[in-house]
Image (cartoon, rainbow, N blue to C red):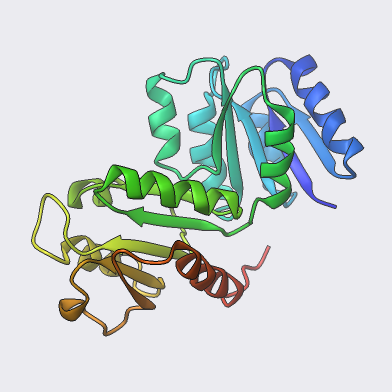
Amino acid sequence: MRRYLLLDDNRAFAENLAEILRDEGHQAVVVTSGDEALRLARTTRFDALLTDMRMPGMSGADAVHHLRRVDPGLAAVVVTAYPREDDLETARREGLLAVLPKPVPIPTLVGLLSGARRDGLVVLVEDDPALSDNLGEVLRARGFSCVTAASVLDTDRIACLEPFAALVDLRLPGGPDGEALRRLRERFPHLPIFIMTAYPDVAPMEGAAGVFSKPFDTGVLVDALETAHAARPTRVP
C-alpha cells in the first residue's frame, strides 16, 4: 500500500481521484491549500504528491518547491489545464515525475503513481533535445523523476535539492568540455554521475559511476541507475 498527497483547490475533483486510488488499495489524503500540504508533509511520509498548478494563494509550482524542502524524496506529478503557463517551467526545475492534462487520464495517472520512486530524482544534462526527451521518457516510465539541463548555464539553474544520480554529457554549450560535470561535482560531491559522450577516450574516468559511449544501449544505462538507486544511502524519515 502506498500513500499519496493530493493538492487541489477543487475538493470534489481531488476526492474523485482519491477514491479511485483508494479503490486500488492505497491511502490518499486530500488538501485544498499549499499550507495544509506543508503541515501534513512535516508529520507524514508520502510516496508521491499530485498537485494542481493554478490555485489561490500558493501555486502548484510553489507547493512543489516548499514541499521538497520539507521532504526532498517526494515524487511529484502536476496536473494542469494550462500546460504553457510560466509557473510550469518553474515546477519542472524542481524535477517532476510527470505533467498531466486536465481531465486527467486515469490509467496513466494510476500507472505513474504506482511506479513512482521516493528519492528517485535524476539530473539529466544533455543538449540533444531528441536524446534528452527519449531518456526522460524512459526514466519516468521506470518511476524516476527527472530535471533536465541543456547547457552549462542551465546546470547552474537546477533547483532540486537532493538528486540521487546524474546523467551528464561532456560537451555542452556555454563552457569547455566537462564544465557542467565539474560544476555538478562541486555542488554534489557524493553524487553518482554517469557520463554520456561521443568521446569516451577523453572522458574523465576518475570519480565517474560509469561512462556510456554514444550511441549507447538505453536499457543498460537505466539498469545502472536502478543499481545506484538500490545502493543509495537510506534517508531517515
- Using the rendered view, name the quadrant where residue 195 is placed: bottom left
- Using the rendered view, name the quadrant where residue 58 is placed: top right
Q: Nearer the viewer, residue 17 or 55?
A: 17
- Residue located 68% across and 39% down the image: 39
Q: Quadrant of the C terminus?
A: bottom right
Seen from this angle, which residue lies furthest left?
Answer: 176
Say if residue 160 shows up in the picture. Answer: no
- Residue located 65% across and 68% down the image: 236
Residue 221's place in the image compared with 115, above or below, is: below
Position of residue 94 measured from the top left corner of the image (x, y, whole percent): 44, 43
State left or right for residue 213 relative to residue 54. left
Position of residue 47 measured from the top left corner of the image (x, y, whole percent): 70, 50
Residue 42's place in the image compared with 200, above or below, is: above
Position of residue 93 measured from the top left corner of the image (x, y, whole percent): 39, 41
The total of numbered circles placed on residues is 0
Residue 37's place in the image compared with 166, above or below, is: above
Say if residue 85 shows up in the picture. Answer: yes
Q: Nearer the viewer, residue 71 or 25?
A: 25
Position of residue 196 measured from the top left corner of the image (x, y, whole percent): 30, 66
Residue 225's place in the image compared with 180, above or below, is: below
- Residue located 55% across and 49% down the image: 140
State left or right for residue 19 relative to residue 213. right
- Residue located 21% across and 68% down the image: 182
- Using the rendered view, name the quadrant where residue 112 is placed: top right
State left or right for residue 65 relative to residue 231. left
